[in-house]
Amino acid sequence: MISSTNKFEQLPKEKQARIVDASVVEFSERNYETASMNKVVERAGIAKGSLFNYFKTKSSLYHYIYHLAIGEVKAYLRKVRDETVDLPFEKRLTKIVDSGVQFITDHPRLARIYFRLIYSADSPNRQKIVTELQVLSNDYLGEIIQDAMDRNELDPNLDKGQAVFFLDSILNRFLKDYHEAKSHGDVDQFNRDEWVKGITIFFTKGLK
Amino acid sequence: MISSTNKFEQLPKEKQARIVDASVVEFSERNYETASMNKVVERAGIAKGSLFNYFKTKSSLYHYIYHLAIGEVKAYLRKVRDETVDLPFEKRLTKIVDSGVQFITDHPRLARIYFRLIYSADSPNRQKIVTELQVLSNDYLGEIIQDAMDRNELDPNLDKGQAVFFLDSILNRFLKDYHEAKSHGDVDQFNRDEWVKGITIFFTKGLK
DNA sequence: TATAATAATGACCAGGTGGTCATATTATGA
DNA sequence: TCATAATATGACCACCTGGTCATTATTATA
């Protein structure tokens, strides 16, 4: 079966990039329903008919773009997971938070799309996507926590599901607030190192 | 100065209620930008011109409605705070979570408006509102935590700001997930008592 | 170069939006 | 009862939306 992005992927890379960039800007600045295809074509410098030739619907363009964002997030997570397998839980957690901060710095717009997806309720297929991300997060943090339990760095009798939930809540909230502060220019209200330290201490002392 | 809701408040209570109900439904089901004034008047059974006579703009109607939601939330929080001043931190926390769950059960639509406000980025004056709520939460949870520190139930050397942040993150996330699960009908995935217990244990053992 | 195939274009469509305002209805008071 | 003031009404406005498609421009083939 031919995907709706097939025609798009035949395009010259430069044109693809223009369209992706324009879409990322639009979907990061407005939510799904208010994001405008007219604005996308305007910014990308192509005709409206062309865009609807590459992507049959607004929904399919959005699908393509948020997959891109999630893919990028996943890459960061995988990288930091693999680079820290041998570190103790505390150090590992620090690196994970750092990596999140780094992602936000490197890809603020993708981060915004990601947070929109998680926290707002208006994207198409929202429930399916959120469930997917939940599973991803569970697997990812679950692995980190399991490792720590195996090494007796965390109480081996922990309710792993709950521990993952707590960790996920705090990490996501911290990164979201950090992202928001950063995009409003007052990033200094977060002394990053202090917070990273605080989070790790909270969890190590807290669950031990 | 005469507020834009002045004319509205002169109306017969019954008519006010119809308009408030219709607005609450609309703003709970759609986000600010996609909520429709046409739908509101239709549901309330009044003419469009009338609604714009009572509220000069969509934004001022929204303002009125979310203040209502926040007011209700505050009332619940105040109540549980005052009723639990003498209880130990653990019991107190349990009651707070319970009260949140109760609010969601009693006012699911107001809860939705509240969560929309916190988690989505598209309401007018969003930044101001969110800052206000942040302050509210800081005062509220800050007081609870300070009490516990004073009684040596929590480590008196805690960074209170961080402790509040952690607590706020987890409480909000739990209630949001609970609310979502409930409105999708699969509330049973949350064994409420178990979670309430888990959260309190996590914090008491964690911060002590 | 002539022809066929492919890709790009933007005027156009139906349907929605927040908001307005001349007109119709109702309430008030003498 | 009649005149005046207050309120309710919905047709209407300009503007925007996602999406379409006949026409035009470009490219590939011969």
Image: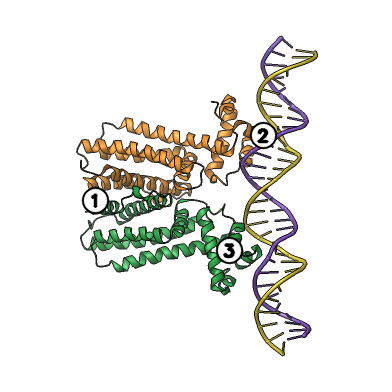
Chain colours: A orange, B green, C yellow, D purple
Secondary-structure class at tag 3: helix
Mark 3 or 1 closer to N-term? 3
Residue, disc 2: A49
The structure residue drawn at horizontal position 54% and vertical position 38%, both measured from the top left corner, is A62
The subunit letter for the residue under badge 1 reads B
Q: Position of residue B135 (x, y in %)?
A: 40, 60
* Rendered position, A176 above or below C7: below
Q: Is residue A67 left or right of residue A81?
A: right
How busy is the neighbourhood of tag 2: few (under 14 within 10 Å), some, or many (20 plus)? few
The subunit letter for the residue under badge 3 reads B
Q: Position of residue A7 (x, y in %)?
A: 59, 27
In this rendering, do the residues under marks 3 and 1 share a single chain?
A: yes
Q: Position of residue A192 (x, y in %)?
A: 36, 45
* Rendered position, B118 above or below A4: below
Secondary-structure class at tag 2: helix
Mark 1 residue type: Gly
Label placed on residue B206: 1
Residue, disc 3: B44
Front position in the image: A97 or A27: A27
The structure residue drawn at horizontal position 26% and vertical position 37%, both measured from the top left corner, is A146
